[in-house]
Image (cartoon, rainbow, N blue to C red):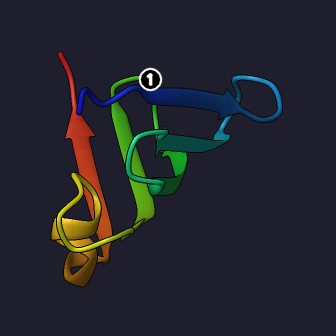
């Protein structure tokens, strides 16, 4: 059976120092999903810190359900020049 996955991304507030973001995917074929919430914090114009959490769920044989035991919280540091 082919999978049809919907993806949505929403950013809240102005693009200032804090930037909350919500990303979600839903698979119609298996009724499984991925929810990823993160907050970006701009330390300077070239340094960004992000804190997020990802949650996966669904039947064991589905795309996201296969990884449902891998929910995580993460911290990301980005420096650009």
Q: Quadrant of the N terminus?
A: top left
Q: What residue is drawn where x is 53% and y is 41%?
A: 23
Q: Is residue 63 left or right of residue 5?
A: left
Q: Is residue 32 left or right of residue 47?
A: right
Q: Residue furthest right?
A: 13
**73 up-or-down from 40: above or below:** below
Q: Quadrant of the C terminus?
A: top left
Q: Quadrant of residue 69?
A: bottom left
Q: Residue furthest front?
A: 1
Q: What residue is drawn where x is 32% and y is 71%?
A: 59
Residue 15 in view in this figure:
yes
Q: Quadrant of residue 22?
A: top right
Residue occupied by mark 1: 45
Q: Residue 81 or 60: which is nearer the viewer?
A: 60
**In what element is the residue under mark 1?**
loop
Q: Position of residue 11 (x, y in %)?
A: 69, 31
Q: Residue 9 or 59: which is nearer the viewer?
A: 59
Q: What residue is drawn where x is 49% and y is 39%?
A: 28
Q: Residue 18 or 28: which is nearer the viewer?
A: 28
Residue 42 in view in this figure:
no
**28 up-or-down from 39: above or below:** above
How many other residues sit within 10 Å of disc 1, few (<14), some (14-19) or many (≥20)?
Answer: few
């Amino acid at each position: 059976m082919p999978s049809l996955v919907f993806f949505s991304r929403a950013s809240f507030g102005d693009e200032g120092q804090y930037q909350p973001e919500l990303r979600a995917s839903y698979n119609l074929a298996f009724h499984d999903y991925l929810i990823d919430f993160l907050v970006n914090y701009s330390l300077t114009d070239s340094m960004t810190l992000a804190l997020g959490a990802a949650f996966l769920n669904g039947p064991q044989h589905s795309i996201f359900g296969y990884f449902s035991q891998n929910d995580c919280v993460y911290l990301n540091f980005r420096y650009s020049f």
